[in-house]
Image (cartoon, rainbow, N blue to C red):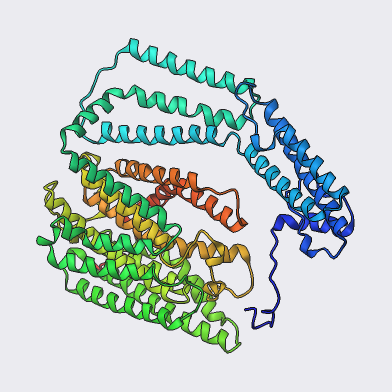
Amino acid sequence: FLAEWQLENLKRLDVNQADIAPLMASLIGVPFPLNSVGTLPLEYLNNSAHFKAESMFTNAAQVLEQFKVKMYQKKKTTLSFLFTPFKPLSDSEQINFLRKIRLFIQQQKYDEAVSLCKALINLALEGLSYYHTYDRLFLGLSISASFVGWTTYVIVTIIKAHTSLTKTVQTNSKESTLLFYCFAFVGTAVAVFLLIQTCPWTYYIYCLLPVPVWYAVVKEIAVIEDLAKNLLSLPISQSVGFLLVCTLGIEILVFSFFYRSTLSIGLLVFAGWPVITQLWVQAKRTTLVWILLCVLLAVFTLMPVVGREPNISLVVAAGLVTLLISCFSLAYLCRSENKYRSNSNLKIHFYQMLSIALSTYIVSSTHESLKNKHGLPLLNQIISWMTLVSSSLLPLLSPTFLFQRLFSILLSLMSTYLLLSTGYEALFPLVLSVLMFVWINMEQEALQHYGLSLKPKLAGFNFACATDITQFRQLHLDDIRRSFFFVFFLVTAFFGTGNIASVNSFDPASVYCFLTVFSPFMMGGLLVLKVVIPFVLVSCAFETIQVTTQLSSKSLFLIVLVISDIMALHFFFLVKDYGSWLDIGTSISHYVLVMSLTMFMMLMNGVAQLLTTQRLELPRRTKHHSM
């Protein structure tokens, strides 16, 4: 880069963003800004050594004054016996520094004065950081206690309400009353302590929240004791192995937010799951397809982020592959039993195939037109918007039999996704969907393998008849694996073709089939839709697994809540308040994303239920018979 601009013979000199304020102040001859934490970059000043030394001395005095103010504020709001000052910069040390710097300037030892000023500024900045984060440990422990307490409470609720591991224990009213008063006393003591220290109102939330949470946990101490007895009765190697597998799984999810390639490792482990559990013995063909699709999906997270190099030919290829699969599906429907097909169902399937073909053509012709500087054709734009609107309605017209409804959802969403694609990402929802179909079959094999239920006939399964709450069974250890698979596939949908935590990952070319005039809200809405489509596909598959394995959504989502809470605790400790704005923003966005994961999953579950169970009936023509 330097050679291209013929600058390789010059020394590069970078400055921090904060250093610009004191530099500007020095150049125009005004006092340094009051809250500036920058260090004056002397290399940019063409002036005398005396001026530089005096400027650095002023800079050091200004930063030191901020340190003193911050120390006074913290000392004022902290009990004297609990206050710990910043020892490297005590009052005597401050006086000693200032006296030495002034002496060096008087003796014209400017270099020594400048180096001492820099040392004082660095110490003052360390002290500022020390007092800024003075309560970090205290607040961090309070928030961690809330996380751990809440997660423990959810686990206890799962065990108590959705498993048969514990027995119903009668609670002693006297013990419950005593426990309540103990926790009430602790809460009052914490509130008084915060009041004496005149803490902000947010401190009360952080510090008082663990009290009711842990009260709810301790109330269920009998359940915890029963659980402990059951765990101790198991072989130690089995318990340790289970904990190690859970820890490794969650760590892979956390690392995937920073390194997309970590998801490939997880998918390769998923590929080996049927082999490790001996599931392949009873379903060899399904296992082989599962392994191939896991490996194929693992390739996507190793590829560069979408938007770098548009490749419309891959979008066309994705459309053609979808059409080919649709033709096989149509042929299967035509040969199937009468109860699974009708003329109206075949018409809807045909319309969806036509929509896929149109979307493939529209993407190709639109980008060709834009490449030739002819703009976006009006007909293409109208068809694109019509496809977008119809994609949410066509699945509701299809029959509610399992594979027909799921395939209808795939075709409708794929027609929209193709219009929003510019490269290899067009193949991603297709591979993901086929893997979801195989996952549904694998879970049925797993149910039979563990003897939880007989293998039902999935082809005849009807979503509309799967809402009987009395059929729900108790949780099994394998259901934790199912919930983890769901979270993992959601994260894969999240980062499969790029890091959606950053707006920079999006390419405006994705929306060129809909509009070419800059419209941030419209473009943002279309890009969000593109991101949501893979989530909907995964959620529909999980909804299917939930009803076919006879599990209540509440029990599975409580397990998901535990997984997301443990991940959130990880990201809480990874939040940064230093470095570039991108680093700080990314760390905060990761934490917020994981915290909102459960609410987002509940929303997606609602959408999946709507798409799988509801059906719109078209008005039929009435036949009149002549007498």
Q: Nearer the viewer, residue 336 or 292?
A: 292
Q: Nearer the viewer, residue 582 or 497?
A: 582
**Number of numbered tags placed on the structure image:** 0
| Picture coordinates of residue 534, whole percent (x, y) | 39, 62
Outermost residue on the front side: it is 107
Q: Is residue 31 visible?
A: yes
Q: Nearer the viewer, residue 414 or 228?
A: 228
Q: Vertical placement of 57 versus 495: above or below? A: above
Locate residue 322: give its quadrant.
Answer: bottom left
Q: Vertical placement of 105 versus 135: above or below? A: below
Q: Is residue 320 left or right of residue 459?
A: right
- The residue positioned 49% from the left and 48% from the top of the image is 574
- The residue positioned 42% from the left and 66% from the top of the image is 391
Outermost residue on the bottom side: it is 372
Q: Looking at the rendering, in which quadrant would you find the N terminus?
A: bottom right
| Picture coordinates of residue 532, whole percent (x, y) | 44, 60
Q: Looking at the rendering, in which quadrant would you find the C terminus?
A: bottom left
Locate residue 159: give its quadrant.
Answer: top left
- The residue positioned 47% from the left and 47% from the top of the image is 571
| Picture coordinates of residue 321, whole percent (x, y) | 32, 78
Q: Nearer the viewer, residue 21 or 481?
A: 21
Locate residue 477: give its quadrant.
Answer: top left
- The residue positioned 70% from the left and 61% from the top of the image is 15
Q: Is residue 613 visible?
A: no
Q: Is residue 35 left or right of residue 363?
A: right
| Picture coordinates of residue 233, whole percent (x, y) | 16, 32
